Image (spheres, helix red, strand yellow):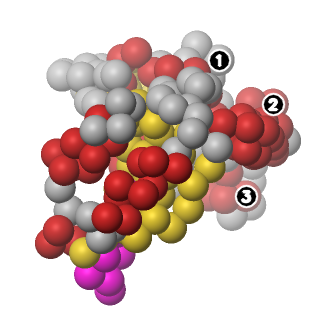
Amino acid sequence: MRAIELITEEIPPLTHTDTGENALRWMDELKVSHLPVLKNGNFVGVLSEADVLDKMHLDEKLDKLFDHLPRPYVFANAHIYEVLAKISEHRVSVLPVLDENEKYLGCTSVYHLLTVIANTGSIRESGGILVVEMNAVDYSMAQIGQIVESNNAKILSSYIMSSVDSTKVEVTLKINQIELSSIIRTFERYDYVVKAAFQKSEVDDDMQQRFDALMNFMKF
């Protein structure tokens, strides 16, 4: 999925003639801590709630309050992984999307991204989850896939986690089967460490509750 497909119409940009008070009011209403700023239709930068609160005269316009704003953004054809990486790198709740000429097209938000991922990924699909650990040098998705498929199952999605101070990697697998016992035994025969296993009922109840709780938290 590309950034152009992740734009939300629910978050309008500020303009350089808006005041600090207006910016804070919009952020409060939209439940975000950042907003893009435009000047004559051109992208200027991203304004943060913290930076506005540091100013004394909030009745002044943004172009008087700020000489410079940070400019985190992604291009329209950026993959969703790049969008997530940019949001994490710059710690923003809203990220602008520009075309190849740096014309502002719109923006996406953390809340919108989480909703898109939850609705289009494998989170809602029936199945179970396995978390397996191995040495980084032994990691092979081909072998992992072969182990799962040898038990007449398929991997719906996977996620890899690693740490700079560890030689291990942890792979989370969403599998299209509810019963995982035979798959677990096969992984163990190949010397994989199965750190966790979640059956369908646990996944549906626990993960859905966690996701719904996160969505509700981000609305406030």
Cα–Cα span, label 1 and label 3: 24 Å
Q: Secondary structure at mark 3?
A: helix
- Which of labels 3 and 2 is toward the front? 2
Q: Amino acid at mark 2?
A: Glu
First in residue order: circle 1 vs circle 3: 1
From mark 1 to mark 2, how far is it between C-alphas?
Answer: 11 Å
**Quarter where residue 140 is shown:** bottom left
> Residue 37 at what x, y percent from top left?
50, 33
Q: Are marks 1 and 3 in contact (CB under 8 Å)?
A: no
Say if the magenta span includes residue 168: yes
Question: Residue, x 29% and y 35% (percent of image)?
Answer: 149
Which residue range is magenta in the image?
A: 162-171
Q: Which residue is mark 2?
A: 29
Return the residue at label 1.
10
* Point 46% across, 36% down: residue: 175
- Asked whether residue 35 is in view, the answer is no
Instruction: Give the mark, 1 or 2, whose residue is nearer the N terminus.
Output: 1
In percent of width and height, residue 158 lies at 38, 43
Q: Which residue is mark 3?
A: 53
Instruction: Give the residue at the far bottom of this rendering.
Output: 165
